Image: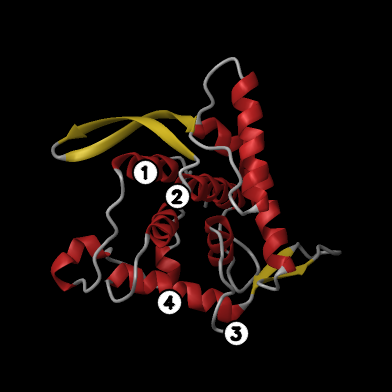
Amino acid sequence: MAGSPPQPLSLPEAFVLLSHRESGRVHDVKQTATACAAAELGELALGRNLLVRIRKTRKLGIEVYRGPGEMELLDSGPTGLDWADALLAELVQTTATAPQPVTARRWLRRRGSAALSLHRAALTERGLLHHRPAASFRKERYHPERGARNALIDAVRAAYDGSGPLDPHLLFLCQLEGSAQLKRDFGLTRWRHQQVDSSRVPEPRLPEDLRDTFNALRMYVPSREE
């Protein structure tokens, strides 16, 4: 229904829908693809299927993350999402056969293009992206369904200013939007934790290992190529 995205949208689906402008394009395909793959791992982390182990230090009271981020599989059982089950099976096989630990940084580079294609196709099938194939002198486009995208943008804006609910799923989506440099597109400036006194809705308290996983994944999203 227009104005209300079908539920549930997985993290990569929500990210891909938000990333497509009305023109049918994204700002940077490589950046979008990597962030989409990060959203996939974020979904698995929220389900406690995996974690990313990252070196962490503190400088002047600020946590600093370094390293490629070794992935640790916690549970490879069914998730209820076909794409996530397939991804877990691939991770299990890769982890078992890789001569060295599988790192998130390398995985995201390898997975990005396939992840973006997969979730674009899923959104197109659900009517949330409208595919315009390439033709002579015309590039391929994926136009977002306006009502569904606007509903997601409203949820992100409410999460930013503290006027709406913020669960771990939406928290990581907002963090990814920041890493992918999309905040300006949505008119977002200040994150709620910078104005705690005026925020009416508390942030979710995350286990430290999940918070570290989120921070590691968004660190690996490359800057936009202008």
* SS state under label 2: helix
Residue 124 drawn at (x, y percent) = 72, 67
Q: Which of the two marks, 4 or 1, is nearer to us in this view? A: 1
Q: Residues within 10 Å of mark 4 (few under 14, many from 20)?
A: few
Question: For the residues marked 2 and 4, what is the alpha-carbon distance in whole angstroms?
Answer: 23 Å
- Mark 1: which amino acid? Leu
- Mark 2: which amino acid? Leu
Q: Is residue 78 left or right of residue 195?
A: right
Residue position marked by numbered label 3 in the rendering: 2
- Mark 4: which amino acid? Asp
Eyeballing the image, is 174 above or below 54?
below
- Mark 3: which amino acid? Ala
Q: Nearer the viewer, residue 169 or 146?
A: 169
Residue 123 drawn at (x, y percent) = 67, 65
- Residue at figure coordinates x 17%, y 34% from the top left: 59
Residue position marked by numbered label 2 in the rendering: 46
Residue position marked by numbered label 1 in the rendering: 210
